[in-house]
Structure formats: C-alpha cells, structure tokens
Amino acid sequence: MHFDDRLATVLRNRAAGERAAKTQFRQLLDLLGERPQAGDPALKAAAYLRLIALAEIIPTADRAAMVGENGWRFRNPELVRWFGEAHPSIAGAALYRAQLSGEEWEELIPRLPIRARGFLRHRRDLPEAAVRVLDRLGVSDRALPLPPDLPQVEPEPVEAPVENDELGELEPLILRPANENPSEDIAEPASQEEAAPEPEPVVEAQEPLPAAAAPEKSDGIRALVERIETFRKARAPASAQGDAPTLPMAGLEDITPRKAVEAFAFGTNSEGRIDWAEGDIAPMVIGLDLSQRRDGGEPGEDFASAFLNRQPVREAALALRGAEAIEGDWIVDAAPRFTRGEGRFYGYVGRFRRAVAPVDDRAQRGADRLRQLLHELRTPVNAMQGYAEVIQQQVFGPTPHEYRALAASIAGDSARILAGFDELDRLARLETGALDLEPGESDFAAIARTQSEQLQSVLGPRVARFDTEFTDQPAPLALAKSEAEMLGWRILATLAGATGAGEAIALTLALEDDQVTLRAQLPAKLAQAENVFASEVRSGGSTLSSGIFGAGFSLRLARAEARAAGGELSRVDERLVLTLPLLTASDALPSPADTPDRAAG
C-alpha cells in the first residue's frame, strides 16, 4: 500500500444515527490512536472536528466507555492531550489507557490541565520519567495512604452471621434513633448473665423517626437510606397532588425558610449589637452592630445618632447585608431600655419592617448565569466555525472537494448552534424584562396573510394545507415590522413544521374590540402534548425547522415576545390563541408633517 487512505474513507461517510455515530467514533479512535505519522494536516484536523460533531450525538457516558475499551491502541500524545481537556470521565478513561514512552510523557504532562494530571497518580505502570515529572509538579494522589505495617486482624466468628450480599459476612453498621428499641434487629444473648442491662431512656431535642414508618428489616446502607427518607417525609410538608418527582432527600431544604422576611422583632445589648431576634431570623441577624455609622452616607446613620443620645428611633432607614432572606433595605422602629432601679441603659428593643416590597430576583440571576454560560459556549463554536470555513475556502492551500464539503457541513451546524444560542439569550432577556421589542407600526393582518401563502407551497407536497379565514381590515400594531414578522413566522412556521401529511390546519384572524386575535388549530403531534410550550416535537425531514430545541421552545419564545408586546399566547382546548393590542391614536408615532422642522438651513 503506497498511501493510507483509511481516515479519508471514514470521514467520507456521514453518521445518520446514534449507532452509526458510535461506530464512526470507534473507527476514528483506532486510526488517530496510532503514533503520529506524516499525513495531510487538514485531514487530521477534519478528523478532530468530526469527533467534536459526534460528541453532540453520543452521550458522555458512552464516549467514556468507548475510550476506556481495550480493543484499540492508544499511542498518540496529541490525542491524549486532546482527551485530557474533555469531560472528567472521558479524560480519566483516556489517561488510564494511554501507552506512551517516558520522553512523550515528560513532554506531555506539563501541558495537561491540572485536573487531568491527578488521574495519572492512580496508575502504577507509568515510566520513571513520567513519575519524576509528576513529583516535580507536586501532583499527589487524592486518596489517603494506608498506614504502614497495618496489622491484619481476623474477624471473630459469630454464632448467627447476618447474610448480606453487599458487605459479605460482616454485619453492617446500622444507625438508629436514640429512643428506638434495638431488640428487633439484635440477636438475644446466649444467657441472662451475658445480657446487658436495659439502658435508660435518652431524651432528644430533635423529633425522632416515627416508629410505625420505620423499616421492619435493616439491611446496611439500604436501611440507612430508608430511615433518612422516612425522617424527611415526617419533617417536610406534604407536597401537592401532581408534583413532579424529586431526588432523594431533596425536600430537606424545604424545612428552612425560602421567602424573604417581611418583618421581625429584635433586641440589642448596651453596645448596640443584636442579641435577640424572633423565630428563625435569629441566626441571620444576631451579632449585627447597629450603633456604627456607615461610610459614604449609607442608611444607618439615623439609628447610630439616636443610639449615641439614647433616644427613640422612628422610621430610621437601615440596610442589612447577609443572608438572602434578610438582605435589603429596612425601616426600624425601636425604643431604648433602662433598668428600673438605677436607670442604667442596657439596649434597644424594636422591630424591622421592609422599606419596600421585596423583589424576587432569582429569575434575573438565573438569566444572568445562562447568558454567561452562552457567552462561554460561543467561543469554541465560533472557533469550530472559523476553522471549518478556513478549510472550505482553501485558505491554507488546495483541499479535496470531499473535505471542503465536510467543512461546509460543520460550518452550517455551527451556525445553527449559534442561532440556538441567540434564541436562548433572547428568551432569557424577554422573560426577565431586560429586553423590549422595537416599537413602530406594522399591519399584522397583512403579515399573517403573506406568510400563510408562503407556507402553502411547503405544505403542498405533503397534501397538507392552511384553511385561512382572515379579516379584510388592517390590524395595526405598535411594533416594528421586523418584530411583527418574526413573531408571526415563529408561530406559523412551527405549526407548519409539525403538520403531518394530509392534515388541514384552520387559521382565523379577527379584530375583537381593541385587539387582534389569531386562532390556529394545533396539529395532531402538538395536540397530544400535555404542555404545548414544553413539547419536544421536531419538524423531522421537513424543510421548515422549529429550531434546535423543538417546537415547544419556539412557542415559548413566541409567548414571551407576545407578552413583551402587551399580548398573550395561550392554548385553549385544541387551538393556539394569539392576542395582540391594536395600535390606537394615542400610541401612533407622529408623522413627519407634525414633527417640528429642526433643520437650521
């Protein structure tokens, strides 16, 4: 064989499904796992890009299992470094399988991420050069070392050994509440002399486990988990009917207060520090010093001045910082306290109340974290798209047409991913009120009529259609034409993409009072969904795409856009109803004739 074209043969085939993707992933591992050889750099780059594309189809656990298989040779330092920057499970499997020489390890280890270096400490077959590099970099095993000269103690035989599949012949340690009778699970002694005296009852501050709900038979760790679950159900409030199932012990967080506190009583000592507060607020505020002036004129100076003069405090502004439940601006009313006999000052007693209604900004913080995550994800996707375009446009030199086609496909996939990121960002900003739709004037009736006619040509080959009944009157909206077109197309195109062969979707558009109403019959695929805004129905092989997140996400984004425009998008029985407010005379933009002439000549 004069040249090796196996890699080009593998890349020439497209993975149509998950099974084909796994097969191609294994083929690429087998070819790239050999020691680096001379070849086309663009071909190798295309292979790594194909691995990135296959990672979107194959779950992380399956990829880690394939990397850890023993059926392929792993001698390529470049592939080892590439896997070292992947998911921890994949990086651990790759570094456990890699077989490199001492010189290759010595050059590669300093270039690996710090997290990946720790995986190498679990290997006992590394060359001495690799061990020296790990020692020089200070990489140590994360597990505790065994004590030296640990004596081997043989377990004493018991009369009635407990059979346990998980822990062998040793009886597992079972945790019990202090007031539970342990006689059910512990075998009786052989004689009365060996029987221990009955322990005195122990009084606990916490609520014990209900005896009736305790498991009848203890079985090691499983019994412990059952007891924790029983304790959680006894302490946590009962959930409403129809709630989604939660993870084990997830309800324990319901015991602590989540809502922001509206008001609470407090008391201070003679130094101005809070030494008492009511209810569950005490751990959050005890120890706060209210007698100190705030720098920069922050709220709190009124209370500090009154404290110095031992005067009553009336509606003093104070800002608390700390736990989420108490953080914010407060109004304080308090009175000084004096001893009866000597008249000696010994602190204040009063009450905090919220200055304004607390605003729950958890949604805003979640949107900010999502936007930050999208910003981090755009960087590698932009790099993939740019590198694919470099190959497709032959910037570094002539490239075979097969590789250019593959690079063009990767660039197209990257563009679709970036479009999905933009939709996620737009939804997060709309739902938190951080984005307003562009104002203007548009005729929604004309827009809906034009778009429905365009979609008829797509539905025709499937023997499907839109049965439209639109009003002849204009439906002016206080939205820019681009915003109204985007909203209408998002709804109509999503419905058309989910329409099956032979279906007829009824569309009606009418003016009702001061709003325009669009009613659309749901296709059969969407009508079966319990929540149409969470449906994962996709367009399949249709030329219309509802986005990378499915029809439910597109409709949810359309609902957010409708609400931002002052309307609503909801499901009524088997129809999707869109309502938008009409443009009134007071909302109309001034015409150029009414605008004063600002030209200075």
Image: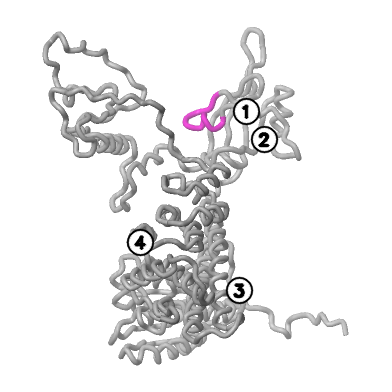
Q: Circle 1 sits in a helix, a strand or a loop, which is it? A: strand
Q: Nearer the viewer, mark 2 or mark 3?
A: 3
User: Badge 4: few (under 14), some or many (20 or more) residues near its Cα, within 10 Å?
Assistant: many
Quadrant including the C terminus: bottom right
Circle nearer the viewer, 4 or 2:
4
SS for callout 3: loop
Tell me the kind of residue under disc 2.
Ala
344 vs 581: above or below: above
CA distance separating discs 4 and 1: 68 Å
Residue that label 2 marks: 316
User: Given contact means CB atoms under 8 Å apart, are the residues at marks 4 and 2 in contact?
Assistant: no
Indicate left or right for 170 with 123 as reference.
Answer: left
Q: Gap in Å between the C-alphas at discs 4 and 2?
A: 66 Å
In percent of width and height, residue 230 lies at 27, 36
Magenta region: 276-285
Give the residue number, with chain letter if any, for mark 3.
438
Q: Earlier in the sequence, mark 2 or mark 3?
A: 2
Which residue carries the number 4 mark? Answer: 66
Q: Marks 2/1: CA distance?
A: 9 Å
